[in-house]
Image (tube, grey):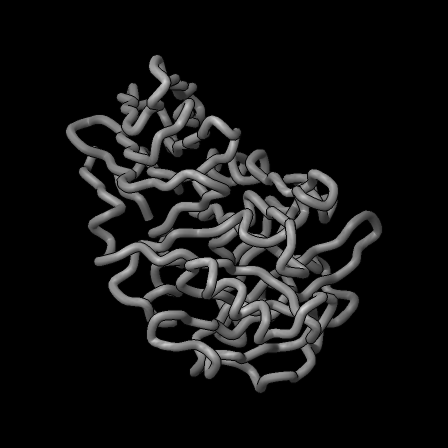
């Protein structure tokens, strides 16, 4: 197994929210208020993703805080819906305030149509809240051309406990799909549905191009609380180093993984797992004493590399 270190994939960590709403669609607060909310809270970047309307508030950012262009698009189906977020560098952004023109209603796969619509415009697609949308894995299995999947949507969890998508993610991963898991707020206010889910990106710089490249490559972790300082394959072991947690859960398929539990009040700050060689992938979940979790992206063992 080749060595891999997430920390070596960039120079610094940058914390951001990839999904939020404002009064430009169904949010309760104007864009500038949401931007200020995240900047004051210590985030490094924010994507404004109002429904069906392209936003570009990049001019309201700064060298220390990025605001990336974005949108959330959706299609209802017989049961539930499909929603996809698109994130773009400013150079590729659609005209601010322009309305999204959806794919033809008779598109055979509405979810794929939304993903393709984002990719064709130069946006990085992210499939949103599959449980809230009432999607099951067979509904999504054949979808292509996206790398990001919301595995934790804080707003959906806050609203009606439909924010977790881990089973969808693992179904992709055990089939060898390079899908990276994100945590997001999907907030509609600066209240309880905000500041609860984020990604921390390892990147060469705090620039739109560098952040998007790291997201597409999977060089980040997702969290609702704990911090991860290292995620590595070294000397035949998988290693995670993190803020103090109650448990570290190594998730693997098809061979089962391992749970490591703290045996002292100070908690775990490092855990190791030695794969047996039959695993397709290994990922880790770091769970703190409040039940909050940080999720690594997977390391794939069958080709001995991360991405």
Q: In this view of the protein, which residue sits in the foreground, 146 or 126?
A: 126
Q: Is residue 133 above or below residue 292?
A: below
Q: Is residue 9 left or right of residue 88?
A: left
Q: Is residue 169 left or right of residue 209?
A: right
In the displayed orientation, state which residue is furthest to the top. Answer: 263
In the displayed orientation, state which residue is furthest to the left. Answer: 235
Expressed as whole percent of the image width and height from the top left, the position of residue 218 reads: 37, 51
Tell me the residue at 52%/29% (across/down).
291
In the displayed orientation, state which residue is furthest to the right. Answer: 78
Expressed as whole percent of the image width and height from the top left, the position of residue 56 reads: 54, 80
Q: Is residue 227 above or below residue 102?
A: above
In the displayed orientation, state which residue is furthest to the bottom. Answer: 95
Tell me the residue at 25%/63% (across/down).
204
Tell me the residue at 44%/52% (across/down).
199
Can residue 228 be seen at all in this image of the molecule? yes
Can residue 118 be seen at all in this image of the molecule? no
Tell me the residue at 53%/48% (across/down).
197
Expressed as whole percent of the image width and height from the top left, the position of residue 12 reads: 26, 57
Expressed as whole percent of the image width and height from the top left, the position of residue 173 reads: 47, 38
Q: Is residue 131 left or right of residue 287?
A: right
Q: Quadrant of the N terminus?
A: top left
Q: How many marks?
A: 0
Instruction: Classify residue 55 by image quadrant.
Output: bottom right
Q: In this view of the protein, which residue sits in the foreground, 25 or 89?
A: 25
């Amino acid at each position: 197994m080749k060595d891999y270190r997430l920390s070596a994939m960039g120079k610094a960590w940058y914390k951001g929210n990839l999904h939020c709403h404002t009064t430009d669609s169904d949010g309760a607060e104007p864009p500038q208020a949401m931007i200020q909310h995240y900047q004051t809270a210590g985030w490094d970047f924010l994507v404004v993703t109002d429904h069906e309307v392209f936003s570009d508030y990049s001019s309201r950012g700064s060298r220390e805080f990025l605001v990336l262009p974005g949108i959330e698009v959706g299609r209802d189906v017989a049961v539930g819906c499909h929603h996809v977020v698109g994130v773009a560098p400013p150079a590729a952004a659609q005209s601010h305030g322009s309305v999204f023109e959806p794919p033809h209603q008779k598109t055979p796969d509405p979810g794929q149509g939304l993903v393709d619509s984002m990719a064709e415009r130069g946006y990085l697609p992210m499939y949103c809240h599959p449980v809230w949308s009432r999607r099951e894995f067979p509904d999504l299995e054949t979808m292509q051309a996206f790398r990001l999947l919301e595995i934790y949507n804080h707003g959906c969890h806050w609203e009606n406990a439909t924010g977790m998508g881990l089973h969808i993610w693992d179904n992709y991963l055990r089939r060898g799909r390079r899908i990276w898991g994100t945590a997001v707020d999907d907030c509609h206010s600066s209240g309880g549905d905000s500041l609860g889910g984020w990604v921390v990106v390892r990147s060469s710089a705090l620039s739109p191009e560098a952040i998007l490249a790291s997201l597409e490559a999977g060089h980040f972790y997702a969290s609702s609380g704990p911090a991860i300082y290292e995620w590595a394959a070294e000397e035949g072991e998988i290693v995670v180093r993190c803020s103090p947690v109650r448990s570290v859960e190594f998730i693997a398929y098809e061979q089962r993984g391992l749970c490591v539990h703290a045996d002292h009040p100070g908690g775990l700050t490092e855990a190791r797992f030695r794969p047996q060689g039959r695993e397709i992938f290994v990922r880790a979940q770091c769970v703190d004493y409040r039940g909050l979790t940080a999720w690594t992206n997977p390391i794939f063992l069958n080709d001995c590399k991360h991405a």
